[in-house]
Image (cartoon, rainbow, N blue to C red):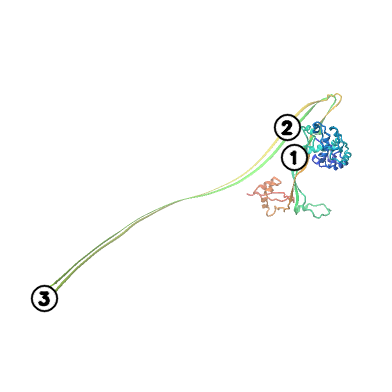
């Protein structure tokens, strides 16, 4: 892979390939000020412009017209857009020896400036100008598509360092660009500054501020392996042999102490009151009524009339006259009436009622208190000892031999870049006072955020306990309160 530091100036040696392609062409070794000016005249300003330039690409294609395997050598002719229309050449091999002004698209003044500033005479010299070769390979490594096909094919199976990151992490940071302290009058510093105003008064931004949430990426690129510290040096005289013992000894001790205290208290109170009422009522009514009436009536009536009358005849009448009459009447009435009435009744009423009441009251109370404390201590000790010997001999009887043992160090290149930026608006808010009359209500309302930002386990346990009074006071008078918690346990 292309070593960037060997072909750029010292001011740009610390940049990576992605940053270097955007720098001016003068960042490459071999590009002088006249050369930079001549390149700018033809539209080449940066390293990327130089590596992807059509002018140098045409010069390279024209100089390799007779190369075996190219389309020009296969058909025995060169494309007409490479050279000027009035340029004459005998064979494809003669194209590389033509002057620079023979290329199409290059005026005579530009060709003269490039020839003098770049110190090139022919098309081949322009095609193989060293800064262009470096820029072309650099752009090919960054963007791809402009590398040498043969070089890419030969390097396909060779491991490369620094091309891809072996590890990449992301982290975010919040940046405030403008604060409310702008525009305040400045005084003369004639005495040491005091931090008491910041402790006694709670200051905060008084107006809106803008900022950004920056997400940065840190990529680790493996650059290679190098030698570190010298661990051991072995000197051998001519013909000397020695036995080298390598002792690998390691010991690992591990101790852990765990203590857990659990307390559980429970109160169970049950009261049962039951009442059962059973009532039976039975009533029987018996009534008998009888009556009678007797009436007897007798009536008897008797009547006997009698009438008598006598008179004389005519003869008699002539002699004498007389009239005799008589009436007899007899009446007898007899009446007999008898009336008899009676009534007889019998009434009997029987009533019976039975009632049973059961009342039961049961009360049960249980109180359980359990406290458990356990302490576990673990101690582990492991050792490893390995000894290996080898014989180191100097078979040269004329010269001494020195063997040096170095540690192997893997070198990484760390690149930190801005991955994403999100604009933020900081809104000033009044700081919460947990020591006021509404302190407990604030704790109940913001219990979740307080639990997530608890500074220690004690504050966390007190905030999670519902039967604890928590007092939150700021330790440092800043915008973020520091939780200090204490409480009384009440049941």
Question: Where, by quadrant of the figure, is residue 378 drawn?
Answer: top right
Residue 221: percent from the left, percent from the top? Answer: 77, 38
| Residue 403 point in image, percent of width and height | 82, 29
Mark 2 nearby-residue class (10 Å; few <14, some 14–19, many ≥20): few
Mark drawn on residue 383: 2
Residue 3 shown left or right of residue 384 in the figure: right
Q: Residue placed at 64% from the left, 43% from the top?
A: 262
Residue depicted at x 74% and y 30%:
385
Task: Write down the residue under mark 1.
Answer: 168
Q: Which residue is mark 3?
A: 318
Identify the mark nearer the N-term, 2 or 1: 1
Q: CA distance from mark 1 to mark 3?
A: 195 Å
Please report the residue visible at 67 percent of the width from the left and 51 percent of the height from the top. 445
Residue closest to the eye, 10 or 24: 24
Dot 2 and dot 1 residues touching (CB under 8 Å): no
Instruction: Tell me the element at label 1.
Output: strand
Mark nearer the N terminus (3 vs 2): 3
Question: Is residue 57 in sight in this rendering?
Answer: no
One can see residue 218 in this view: yes
Front disc: 1 or 3: 3
């Amino acid at each position: 892979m292309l070593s960037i530091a060997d072909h750029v100036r010292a001011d740009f040696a610390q940049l990576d390939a992605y940053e270097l392609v955007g720098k001016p062409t003068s960042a490459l070794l071999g590009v002088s000020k006249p050369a930079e000016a001549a390149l700018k005249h033809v539209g080449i300003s940066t390293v990327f412009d130089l590596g992807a330039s059509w002018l140098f690409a045409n010069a390279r294609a024209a100089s390799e017209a007779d190369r075996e395997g190219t389309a020009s050598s296969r058909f025995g002719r060169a494309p007409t857009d490479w050279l000027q229309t009035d340029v004459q050449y005998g064979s494809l091999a003669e194209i590389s020896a033509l002057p620079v002004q023979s290329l199409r698209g290059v005026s005579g003044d530009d060709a003269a400036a490039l020839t003098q500033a770049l110190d090139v005479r022919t098309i081949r010299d322009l095609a193989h100008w060293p800064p262009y070769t470096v820029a072309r390979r650099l752009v090919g490594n960054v963007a791809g598509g402009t590398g040498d096909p043969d070089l890419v094919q030969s390097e396909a199976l060779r491991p490369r360092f620094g091309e891809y990151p072996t590890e990449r992490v992301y982290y975010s940071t919040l940046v405030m660009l403008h604060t409310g302290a702008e525009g305040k009058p400045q005084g003369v510093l004639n005495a040491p500054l005091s931090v008491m105003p910041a402790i006694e008064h709670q200051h905060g931004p008084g107006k809106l501020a803008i900022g950004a949430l920056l997400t940065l990426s840190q990529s680790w690129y493996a650059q290679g392996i190098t030698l570190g510290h010298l661990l051991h040096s072995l000197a051998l005289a001519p013909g000397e042999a020695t036995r080298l013992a390598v002792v690998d000894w390691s010991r690992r001790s591990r101790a852990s102490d765990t203590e857990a205290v659990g307390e559980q208290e429970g109160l169970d109170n049950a009261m049962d009151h039951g009442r059962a009422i059973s009532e039976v009522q039975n009533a029987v009514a018996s009534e008998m009524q009888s009556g009678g009436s007797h009436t007897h009536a007798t009536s008897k009536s008797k009547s006997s009339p009698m009438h008598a009358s006598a008179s004389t005849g005519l003869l008699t009448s002539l002699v004498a006259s007389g009239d005799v009459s008589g009436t007899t009447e007899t009446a007898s009435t007899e009446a007999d009436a008898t009336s008899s009435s009676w009534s007889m009744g019998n009434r009997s009423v029987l009533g019976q009622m039975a009632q049973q009441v059961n009342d039961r009251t049961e009360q049960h109370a249980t109180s359980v208190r359990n406290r458990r404390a356990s302490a576990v201590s673990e101690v582990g000790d492991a050792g490893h000892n390995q000894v290996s010997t080898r014989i180191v001999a100097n078979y040269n009887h004329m010269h001494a031999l020195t063997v040096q043992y170095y540690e192997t160090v893997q070198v990484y290149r760390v690149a930190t870049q801005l991955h994403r930026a999100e604009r933020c608006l900081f809104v000033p808010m009044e700081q919460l006072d947990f020591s006021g009359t509404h302190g407990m209500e604030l704790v109940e309302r913001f219990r979740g955020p307080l639990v997530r930002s608890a500074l220690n386990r004690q504050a966390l346990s007190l905030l999670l306990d519902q039967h604890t009074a928590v007092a939150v006071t700021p330790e440092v008078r800043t915008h973020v309160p520091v939780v200090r918690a204490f409480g009384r346990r009440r049941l």
